[in-house]
Structures are given as structure tokens and as C-alpha cells.
Amino acid sequence: MRAKSFAGMTCSVAGALEAIGDRWAVLLLRDLSLGLSRYDDLQASTGMPTTTLSTRLKHLETTGLIERTPYQDNPPRFEYRLTDKGRDLWKVTTALREWGDRWNANGLGASTIEMVDGRSGRPVVLALVDAESGEPVPKEHARLRPGPIAAPGLRKLLGETP
């Protein structure tokens, strides 16, 4: 069954999901961010069927999240690299990892990878910061407000009065 397209929805989350594609693509983005770049390595890491892998790589290339470059001519072989747009998804995969670690999503009782400060070696976590001052903002203080192109229904949902 083909998943419904989110194209045309006026929601950045829906647009991001449309660009990424599905859960297999998230695993590819994870592996590419860890430095894997060749088809066989991506297939071995994810255990993804080859048809699924080919389809997801083509989708990620079409949406501009990865680029394919040749590394061998005979037979033709390609490497896959994250574009700037694809690298910018690191916060998404980091947030998923942090959530998975907190709620033991892997069922193993511990994390398989940790993010640390390269200087101190201490663990780091994603955080909200004030865009102007750079100061941390506790999640209890964070609020959503309608953006410039918010639809009337969203404005109402977020409590904006006309």
C-alpha cells in the first residue's frame, strides 16, 4: 500500500516527512552521518532489501538530501554523501536517538552511541536556546505561536484571537 503524500500541506513537519520519506530513509541518514557512503555498506548496516535501498537512495537524492558520485567506472559504482540539506537533519536523528535512549526503544537497557563534548568528553543533549541571546530556554517556558503563513484553523488552535 502506497503511503499518502504530504505534498502541498502547509506544515513544515509534513514537508520534512515528505522529503525524508520513511523510517528506512531515516536509518540511511543515520548511517550516512556516521560516515558510511557505499551501497554495500549501507545495505549491510541496515539489513534493508536491495530494492528498498535503491528506492530510498533515489528518493533522498531527488529531494536533495544526498548526492551520488562515482568512485569506480568499470563496473560503475557510486558513493552517497549527505548534502548540506541532509547534514542539517542531524538534530532530527539526535532527537530520535535521545528519545530512544530515554525510553529504552532498543530493548537493551543502554544506549549504543552517545554524543559528547569533544573537548571535555562529557555527555551533551539537544536543548532549546533563545535565537537572539543564545541562552538556554527550559522546555516549560517554550510556547508555539502561529507563523506568518499559518492557516486560520492553526491560529485558532494556538489561541490567537482574530
Image (tube, rainbow, N blue to C red):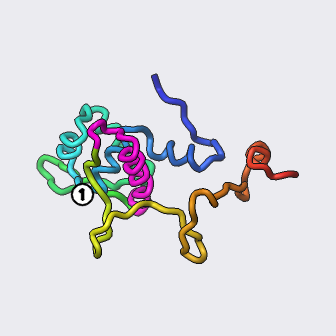
Q: 51 and 72: which one is in front? A: 51
Which residue in the protein does label 1 denote?
Answer: 35
Task: Give the image location of residue 11, x and y in percent.
Answer: 63, 47
Task: Give the image location of residue 29, x and y in percent.
Answer: 34, 50
Classify residue 136 as left or right of residue 99.
right
Vertical placement of 131 versus 46: above or below? below
Secondary structure, magenta segment, majority class: helix
Amino acid beneath label 1? Gly
Classify residue 117 as left or right of residue 3.
left
Neighbor class of circle 1 (other Cα within 10 Å; few <14, some 14-19, many 20+) is few
The quadrant holding residue 136 is: bottom right
Q: Residue at x 73, y 51 (%)?
A: 150
Q: Residue at x 32, y 69 (%)?
A: 117
Residue span colored magenta:
84-109
Q: 75 and 42: which one is in front? A: 42
Task: Give the image location of residue 114, x and y in percent.
Answer: 29, 57
Vertical placement of 69 versus 111: above or below? below
**Furthest-left residue in view?**
74
Q: Residue at x 42, y 47 (%)?
A: 99
Classify residue 21 as left or right of residue 27.
right
Label 1 element class? loop
